[in-house]
Amino acid sequence: MPDAEKYAVIGHPIAHSKSPVIHAQFATQTGENISYEAIDAAPEELHAAITRFIALGGRGLNVTVPHKEAVIELMDTLTERAELAGAVNTISKLEDGTLRGDNTDGIGLIIDLRDNLGLEPENMRILVLGAGGAARGILATLAELRPDELVVANRTLQRALDIADEFADIGRIKARSFDELAEADDDDGPPQAFDLVINATSAGLSGEVAPFPACIVGPDTVCYDLSYSMQDTPFLTWARSHGCKAAHQGWGMLIEQAAESFNIWRDVRPDTAAVRAKLP
């Protein structure tokens, strides 16, 4: 039997990653002969770690925090969606030896929202909390859907304004600071709860109170945290305490974006239902 083709996830820290488990299940299910490891590389080690992995026969990598933006300069080519997102989460070594960067975060989120949770994001008023790398990976995809309303909010308004302006050609995105979410909107009157609130911040992970106004959540609001944990994340605890309709962690997005990466590498898309059933 030929040697397994090598893949990995690279990040810092990386011990918590479930990607090796997920891809091992995909490989078993599809009969693909691959290995998949986790590589812990600090930012100053990123270039050397990727170069070494590829030199030793690596065929592809997933990229996670904090490297999704920094890794771009190491790519020979980018897909359109990676270019739009300004972030890469999937690297492929092509037949000519060059590296191509792609981003499956946005499509992974949409598949989870639509297919797994039964939502119709294009018909919703959507709030994305945070304007950093995690938000970048999903905003372009959400904007392409032309939802009823799309707002990006950040602790500092300027970052929200910058990212909304950057994606303006794709679809209309309003920018707000967290404080402004509690204020009346000149166009729309008093603040209304959103249909879907997506947390793309690390707020609450250090034990501090989430800095979001309670008015963003109502009895019909679905809350979604891009983070995931074996227990409730602080954001989900906050969302439930404010009476949301439903609260979901990012496990589904994690699995769906992984399936998209697997499909890019192996040209077969695994069935994600069996894998989702084994995670919280």
Image: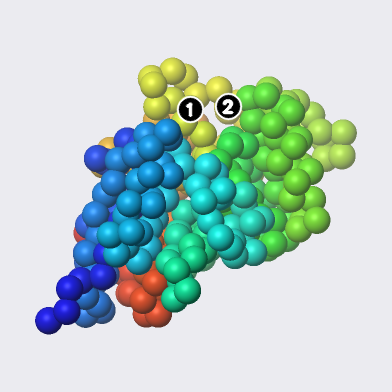
- Whole-angstrom CA distance, mark 1 to mark 2, is 9 Å
**Colouring:** rainbow
User: Residue at coordinates 67% horizontally, 24% vertically from top-left?
Assistant: 156
Mark 2, secondary structure of its residue: loop
Whether residue 116 appears in this view of the structure is: no
User: Residue at coordinates 70% horizontally, 35% vertically from top-left?
Assistant: 160
Q: In this view, does 13 lie above or below 5?
A: above
- Residue 65 in percent (x, y) is at 43, 40
Quick one: 55 or 266, which is closer to the camera? 55
Q: Is residue 107 above or below residue 174?
A: below
Q: Which of marks 1 and 2 is nearer the N terminus?
A: 1
Quick one: 121 or 258, which is closer to the camera? 258
Mark 1, secondary structure of its residue: loop
- Residue 212 in percent (x, y) is at 58, 27
Whether residue 21 appears in this view of the structure is: yes
Front disc: 1 or 2: 1
The quadrant of the picture occupied by the N terminus is: bottom left
Residue at the limit of the structure toward the left, as seen here? 1
Crowd rating for badge 2 (residues with CA inside 10 Å; few <14, some 14–19, many 20+): many
> Which amino acid does the dot numbered 2 rest on?
Phe
Q: In this view, does 83 lie to the left or right of 13?
A: right
Q: Mark 2 points at which residue?
A: 212
Q: Is residue 238 left or right of residue 27?
A: right
User: Residue at coordinates 28% horizontally, 59% vertically from top-left?
Assistant: 56
Counting every numbered tag in the picture gives 2
Q: Name the residue under label 1.
A: 203
Quick one: 65 or 250, which is closer to the camera? 65
